[in-house]
Amino acid sequence: MRPSDALLDTIVALATPAGKSAVALVRLSGPDARQVLASLASRLKADLKPRRPRLAALDDASGERIDRGLVTFFEAPNSYTGEDVVEISIHGSPVAAARLVEAAITAGARAARPGEFTERAFRGGKLDLVRAEAVRDLIEAQTPAAARFSARRMEGGLSKKLEAAREDLLAAAAGIAAAIDFSDDVGENVDAEVERRLRAAADNLARLSATYRTGKLLSSGCRVAILGRPNAGKSTLFNALVGSARAIVTEIPGTTRDTLEALVEVRGIPVTVVDTAGLRATEDVVEKIGVARALEEGDRADAVVYVYDAAEGLTAEDRDALARHGDMPRVLAANKSDLAPEALLPDGAVRLCGLEPSAGETLRALLAEAVASEISTEKTSEVLGSLRQKDLVDRARTGAEQTLEALSKGLSPEYAATHCHAALDALADLVGETTSEDVLTRLFATFCIGK
């Protein structure tokens, strides 16, 4: 089905999470939204006024009562999608919600695809592609910082930055075109203002590109493995970091046989922390599997917290394990330091006692330095939210820089113009003006149904 054909349909979906809840919201959008509602709420006699909730009895095609709920009508173009939209709030019964969606389909609607409501908002010019992606990112945000940056993008903060770069590139393109069109009168010299606007665009885009690491960490988070020999106190530090007794802690070496995960927030970043079995040679079949999994976790992690007993110092086994992850960001924790306050520490090691009330806070600060020292979570900054955005920002920046290089070398304005237009094409793709249908289909398929 072509997008233009699909837009002729009226779609329906449950817009709240499946399962029991206080309220469930069913959303309709499309040219026949009001007619479908008339079939569901035949006793609702008076015309609906836009944005005025009305209490209505809701029935299926056979006239059997489904529920009573609040019905709100949003008239095109003043709705989320830009089409006629109806939102129906009923009691949060999964059965009632499913019956209401089924009744709407019987009345002429069809089930919405994932992200189709936001796709219609994009195609109807209600928001650009950057803001559409931000809707998904806000829904999927795992920390307050991630939600804050997504909300800023959704409100157009990033789009405004991109528009500023685009205005600079358009001005530069116009100046280059003037040099081409009037070369017989003024020669092929390009006005100095053109280079200034190109440099402004390139610098702006370079700053935006540098924010992708922050955006990636905020959206995807990172994985941190806690490694060390048996009885070094890994599980104690894991519990301190999580803030509860998730892992079993005993004085018996080898208590932990499998991996245990928990999600914590570190400087606004969702961090999956993994407690692992102690690293040692063993003939115990179960423990051997646990050691293998610990090594696998260390290899796939983004950072490592390596824990050793401060009283024993670093052993040969510890040094071998550290060498395996030598290039990875890490925290070297000299645990049980209360039992060995005078012990000398190797370079980079930090004294810790997992039993102290401040251990979790201290370890969070150390993790923040290891995995997030270079990122900025300033409330006023704009952050790229996806690899697609970074790729297109980099293409636009490269085009601006290549245009500057061509001009500085005295090459023909025609040659410089091709690079400038390539930069503008990348920005047009970024906001969705020229994005291919295949890319749009894949992008909106990552949304949840009902949004």
Image: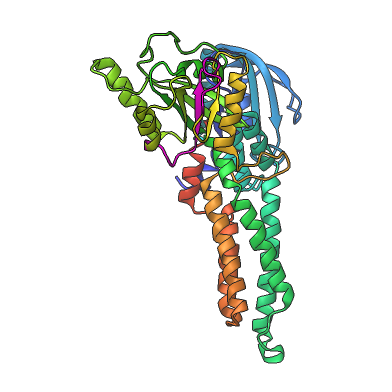
Looking at the rendered image, the quarter that the N terminus falls into is: top left
Q: Position of residue 114 (x, y in %)?
A: 50, 34
Say whether residue 331 is magenta. Answer: yes
Q: Position of residue 406 (x, y in %)?
A: 58, 76
Horizontal arrangement in the rendering, residue 196 relative to residue 432 (left or right): right
Q: Which residues are magenta?
A: 324-344
Residue at 73% from the left image edge and 76% from the top image edge? 192
Q: What is the residue that sits farthest to the bottom in this orientation?
A: 184
Horizontal arrangement in the rendering, residue 195 relative to residue 32 (left or right): right
Q: Hey, which quadrant is residue 146 in on the image?
A: top right
Residue at 60% from the left image edge and 50% from the top image edge? 210
Q: Which scheme is used to colour this image of the protein?
A: rainbow
Say whether residue 133 is magenta. Answer: no
Q: Hey, which quadrant is residue 315 in on the image?
A: top left
Please count the marks in the image: 0
- Look at the image and tell me whether residue 313 can be seen: yes
Q: Nearer the viewer, residue 342 or 82?
A: 342
Q: Position of residue 436 (x, y in %)?
A: 49, 54
Horizontal arrangement in the rendering, residue 262 relative to residue 296 (left or right): right
Residue at 67% from the left image edge and 91% from the top image edge? 184
Q: Position of residue 20 (x, y in %)?
A: 55, 12
Q: Hey, which quadrant is residue 375 in on the image?
A: top right
- Look at the image and tell me whether residue 62 can be seen: no
Looking at the rendered image, the quarter that the C terminus falls into is: top right
Q: Nearer the viewer, residue 363 or 438?
A: 363
Residue at 35% from the left image edge and 28% from the top image edge? 317
